[in-house]
Amino acid sequence: MTLNERTGPSNRHTENIGLHGYSIRFSPFNPNHLVVATSQFFGLAGGGTLFLLESNSEDKLQELKSFQWTDGLFDVVWSESDPTIVVTASGDCCLQIWNLTGNQAPNILKEHTKEVYSVDWARTRCDQFVISASWDCTVKLWDPNRKTSLNTFSGHDQLVYNAMWSPHIPNCFASVSGDGTMKLWNSLNSHYPSASYKVHDAEVLSCDWCKYDQNIIATAGSDGLIRGWDLRNLSQPFFQLIGCEYAVRRIQFSPHNLSTIASVSYDFTTRIWDFSKNSGPIETIKHHSEFVYGLDWNVLKRGQIGDCGWDSLVHVFTPSSLLHI
């Protein structure tokens, strides 16, 4: 699907004007629904658009709804408790909580002092909190039903690109930053990290937790490397994946297989890896003509992934390497 060539009403002020994909997320409730966060003019100026899309049996995409914001949207995540709610992060220091069933303005959470680049919703049953990572070098903890944050976590020396909740350990999240470190946090006990590790000699742009082993986490950097870490021994990575020509923008472990990872990169590729087999990709997909920014696995459809990029394209597909896994 091309974001700049959409069907439907055209009375919105950013219609057909330079929309570039930043983040894509499949619904955890409906296997055919997904949201895409976009920005005008590569996120450098203009507004943002949030799309609610539906994929059919042939993975063709149809726009169901779209929502406008006055600044670029850099990330989006679904609520883990309500199938009608998503949260976006934007360039004007805000989070927006959207109700996809209506046309009302979103609830706005604003405490960060610079761009908010990452947002994640806790997936453990005991809590339903949101974390946001910002270029102001902090991570904030939010209750979506409150206007003010519950906590602010300081410790990174440079902008924070990504913060992700552990899917296994309650109140635990990781963050990665331009300072080359990954930090682990307990959201209940402290404003400061419980552990900090130098994981790349470069900016760290993304991290993700293994869905099958609570001790495994991966990081990706502007050095083009993906590294896997075992929290029981962080003296060196226990795997390293090599093959991306430029920075790795986002990584995600498969929800269906322990050792499978997907990545997207500034080299215009989406790659599939199996760290149990070798250090190179098992498949490289080249269907974008610009930086690929957004990536997600469909938890409800085995092997299906989605990606989006600065070329305004959104793809939903099952890589050939995953057809029989």
Image (tube, grey):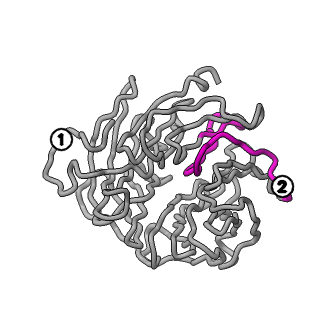
Task: Please state, as top left, top right, bottom left or bottom right, where the C terminus lies in the image.
Answer: top right
228 and 278: which one is in front?
278
Please report the bounds of the magenta region as a residue range.
Answer: 235-262
**Residue 57 is a magenta residue:** no
Query: What amino acid is found at the position of numbered circle 2 in the picture?
Result: Gln
Q: Is 307 placed above or below 167 here?
A: above
Residue 58 sits in quarter? top left
Q: Nearer the viewer, mark 2 or mark 1?
A: 2
Residue at x 36%, y 70% (from the top left corner): 108
Residue linked to disc 2? 236
Q: Is residue 177 left or right of residue 9?
A: right
Query: Which dot marks residue 70?
Result: none
Residue 8, numbered circle: 1
Q: What amino acid type is highlighted by mark number 1?
A: Gly
Categorize mark 2 by other alpha carbons within 10 Å: few (<14), some (14-19), many (20+): few
Q: Please determine whether, in this image, residue 241 is positioned above or below residue 82.
A: above
